[in-house]
């Protein structure tokens, strides 16, 4: 009997050892399941999104000299096809002012536009002044080239800023009618230097000057009228004799005789078209021209001061005589 007890005890111990070894994982799982004490690990991460910049619309201003204060008025000189207009503005970025600094990879686009007109686009080339999260572009940092024929009146200004983050966050501000382009009433006579009828025999009628006067608008005002003020042509040898102003007429078309006849020292309307007397250029047609044809209808003899017309050259380029004036009357 004693021997059997010892054997049973040894078997029991052996079973406990085997159970402890083989089923340790199972028992632990069972214990965890029952007690709620299971533990596992998991990595965690998140990314803060790039935040868009914000342009202060009240800070946007335009000027034509880049000198403070910016008054939002621009006067474009005649015949200037690349006139820089300067734009100032402030932009902030929650991620820091360096994000909207073009020297750090930010992009700025400025568009000046008007319905029916070609838009003008520029950018910034100078580094802004930074303070905290705000960058200020001022002076001549940013510019847009405008052209002499850009229509006078109000234009819109649009500023777009894209920050330097690879995932660009853009911000756009539009200032309606912020910029006022001033009226420039100007034109040039491209040819000829002198109106010339050549050699004319007494009694000859209806002869056109050749070539005609060729006018080109080199401003942005089409004007309401083109007027001509005529004066007598006096003899270059004997200035007491002259051809009367009223012997001449003017017309945009090459017709002779025509009207109106010129009046001594008094403007007469050669072209009368309110707001469209002399075409303004455009990108498609930057230099449209308009002819003015001058007709010598006849030579009144006797002429000036009742003196007989004699063989000589007659001209306005005689001492005391003024040349003819061609005038573009600005639009109302």
Image (cartoon, rainbow, N blue to C red):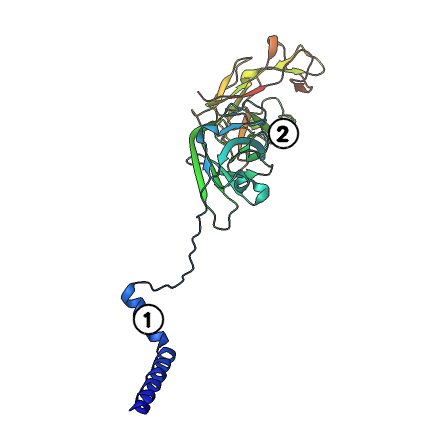
Please provide percent x and percent y for residue 28. Answer: 34, 71
Camera sees residue 85: yes
Q: Quadrant of residue 186?
A: top right
In this rendering, would 225 be left or right of 3?
A: right
Q: Nearer the viewer, residue 122 or 79?
A: 122
**Residue designated by label 2:** 192
Q: Is residue 271 left or right of residue 232?
A: left
Q: Pinpoint residue 136: horizontal percent, then vertical percent.
A: 54, 32
The residue under label 1 is 29
Q: Residues within 10 Å of mark 2 (few under 14, many from 20)?
A: few
Look at the image and tell me whether residue 154 can be seen: no
Q: State which tag comes first along the sequence, 1 or 2.
A: 1
Query: Where, quadrant-wise, is the N terminus in this rendering?
Result: bottom left
For residue 83, above or below residue 313: below
Q: Which mark is residue 214?
A: none
Disc 1 packing (10 Å; few <14; some 14–19; many ≥20): some
Q: CA distance from mark 1 to mark 2?
A: 107 Å
Q: Nearer the viewer, residue 113 or 97?
A: 97
In the displayed structure, would residue 190 be above or below residue 8? Answer: above
Q: Residue furthest top?
A: 305
Position of residue 42 measured from the top left corner of the image (x, y, whole percent): 40, 61
Check whether the beta carbons of the residues at disc 1 and disc 2 lie within 8 A of each other.
no
Q: Nearer the viewer, residue 70 or 230?
A: 70
What's the residue at 62%, 18% (across, down)?
A: 323
State the image coordinates of residue 332 (x, y, percent, origin top left).
44, 20
Q: Secondary structure at mark 2?
A: loop
């Amino acid at each position: 009997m004693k021997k059997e007890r010892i054997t049973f005890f040894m078997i029991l111990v052996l079973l406990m050892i085997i159970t402890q070894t083989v089923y340790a994982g199972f028992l632990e799982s069972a214990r965890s399941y029952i007690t709620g004490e299971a533990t596992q690990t998991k990595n965690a991460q998140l990314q803060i999104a790039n935040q868009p910049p914000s342009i202060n619309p009240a800070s946007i201003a335009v000027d034509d000299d880049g000198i403070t204060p910016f008054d939002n008025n621009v006067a474009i000189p005649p015949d200037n096809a690349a006139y820089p207009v300067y734009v100032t503005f402030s932009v902030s970025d929650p991620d820091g002012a360096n994000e909207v600094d073009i020297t750090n990879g930010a992009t700025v686009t400025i568009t000046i536009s008007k319905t029916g007109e070609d838009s003008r686009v520029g950018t910034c080339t100078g580094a802004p002044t930074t303070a905290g999260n705000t960058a200020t572009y001022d002076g001549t940092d940013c510019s847009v080239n405008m052209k002499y024929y850009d229509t006078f009146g109000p234009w819109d200004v649009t500023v777009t800023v894209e920050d330097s983050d690879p995932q660009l966050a853009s911000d756009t501000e539009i200032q309606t009618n912020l910029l006022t382009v001033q009226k420039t009433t100007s034109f040039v006579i491209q040819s000829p230097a002198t109106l010339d009828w050549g050699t004319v025999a007494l009694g000859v009628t209806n002869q056109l000057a050749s070539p005609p006067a060729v006018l080109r608008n080199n401003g942005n005002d089409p004007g309401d009228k083109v007027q001509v003020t005529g004066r007598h042509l006096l003899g270059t040898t004997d200035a007491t004799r002259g051809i009367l102003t009223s012997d001449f007429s003017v017309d945009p078309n090459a017709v002779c005789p025509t009207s109106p006849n010129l009046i001594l020292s008094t403007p007469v309307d050669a072209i009368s078209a309110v707001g469209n007397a002399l075409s303004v250029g455009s990108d498609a047609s930057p230099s449209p021209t308009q002819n003015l044809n001058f007709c010598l209808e006849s030579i009144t003899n006797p002429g000036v001061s009742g003196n007989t017309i004699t063989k000589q050259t007659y001209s306005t380029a005689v001492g005391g005589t003024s040349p003819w004036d061609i005038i573009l009357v600005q639009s109302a």
